[in-house]
Amino acid sequence: MPEFVFASYSELRTSLESGNTSVKAVVQSYLTRIKNHQSINAFIEVFEESALKQAERLDQKLAEGKPLGKLFGMPMAIKDNIAIKNKKLTCASKILSEFNSIYDATVIERIEAEDVVILGKLNMDEFAMGSSTENSFFGPTKNPVDQTKVPGGSSGGSAAAVSADCAMVALGSDTGGSVRQPASFCNVVGLKPTYGRVSRYGLVAFASSFDQIGVLAKNSEDAARVLEVIAGEDPKDSTSGDADVQNYANAISEFTMNGLKIGVPKEFFTDALDEGIKSIINEKLEALKTQGAELVEISLPYSKYALATYYILANAEASSNLSRYDGARYGYRSQAHPDLEEMYVNSRSEGFGDEVKRRIMLGTYVLSAGYYDAYYKKAQQVRRLIRDDYLSAFESIDVIAGPTSPIPPFTLGEKLDDPLAMYLADIYTVTANLSGVPAISVPAGFTSQNMPVGMQIIGKPYDEATILGVSQKLQALN
């Protein structure tokens, strides 16, 4: 069987419409690659039968001359905290390991309406809590660039699948950098849209005021095409925004760097940043300058409080959201339950992993009587100051640029016993979630140890077109 690897969806679409290949042949090729890359453990479940049936339907649709969807024949995979009807929805947790969804998430309805082929569900940190995809009931995912390294998290399965060409595009979720950081580690593009740009209906909640479904792809154009389909207001999600959805692929094709003002925060270039990464990011910034951009040094003074603020607020929301998993209504139920209270305690103790338990306890603590004002309320106030930092900066600049991660991909198991060191991997990404602004990670180069480096571009609310445009220009420099 021939192996199909396309540089972009545009290339795939042209091949399908010209009759050079079929959707079924392309899907079979991707399914074969998934089998050949089982060692990276990117997939929790592969939908081989349903994917091939969908491919046959799409080939028939093309043969009959019917109108084709915007994403016709695109092989895509989905992070396993996004609901697909009659498929498992595990969140990589023992407590949901046998649970099947009874409905489709809005993003699934929208991509299926545009003729996507869904290849399967992807591995992740349990309930999206982690930065390495090692906190999974189904075992860790490995980085395809170097299988001794982590792929980042929590959307590590999504990033690894795209990086290994086991899916053309993947959907993930980003609560504090969970799309962008693994994109950086796996050398792919990772887009977190503005909070509210994409419906969260059908996304299992971790921290509801932070969570946003995002896109991982090999290039900015493919991410733009998918965003155009999944974005937009949803009556089933009261937090979704009603801002107009652009034709992002067209917008980035017309994008120019001339006159673009790029803010470079001094707080992003401290001693905490790996020297190799710093050198690569500075080189890319200078390259953008030669294309007509203007570099402006800025300050985001409250960003130094971002990590503490994020972990207080996100864990508080997590402790509330995860209270529903008690063994009573759905999911795992402990067999050792002499009474109702023991059933609750044992089901949660046996069903949740260590990192989830840690975050539930931290979140419950900061919400408890006597500590609410000192921690949760204060963190909400600082969150507003961080958002004001960004909105103030955007009055004089167009985008903010810097590293995605302070460190390159680290070795599997290296930080499992040191949660605080693990949390520091999110130091540059959490501010975009605290502020609700869009951000993207784009491949920027490799360290001297041949590890991928991602550059993060942060934009104004609902201005995904600009950060996608900058991202595309950056990729053209590689």
Image (spheres, helix red, strand yellow):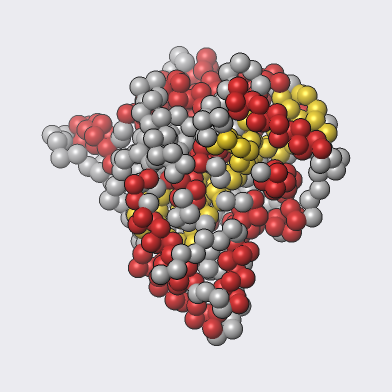
Please name the residue shown 60% across and 77% down the image: 18
> Looking at the image, how many numbered discs can be counted on the residues?
0
Query: Furthest-right residue in view?
Result: 259
Spot occupied by residue 5 in the image (x, y as percentages of width and height): 52, 60
Q: Residue furthest front?
A: 448
Based on the displayed image, in which of its 4 quarters is residue 261 positioned? Answer: top right
Residue 32 visible? The answer is: yes
Position of 431 relative to 37 (above/below): above
Q: Quadrant of the C terminus?
A: top right
- Is residue 323 something that shows in the picture? no
Q: Measured from the top left, where is residue 221 in percent x and y?
A: 65, 55
Instruction: Identify which residue, 48 or 434, lies in the foreground.
Output: 48
Q: On the picture, is 137 further left or further right than 112?
A: left
Q: Residue at x 41, y 67 (%)?
A: 28
Residue 241: x, y in percent?
65, 48
Q: Residue at x 57, y 22 (%)?
A: 274
Where is residue 123? Give x, y as percent. Answer: 39, 46
Residue drawn 50% across the image and 77% down it: 59
Quarter of the image with the N terminus is bottom left
Q: Left or right? Give the position of 406 relative to 143.
A: right
Above or below, 156 relative to 422: below
Nearer to us in this view, 217 or 320:
217
Q: Quadrant of residue 138?
A: top left
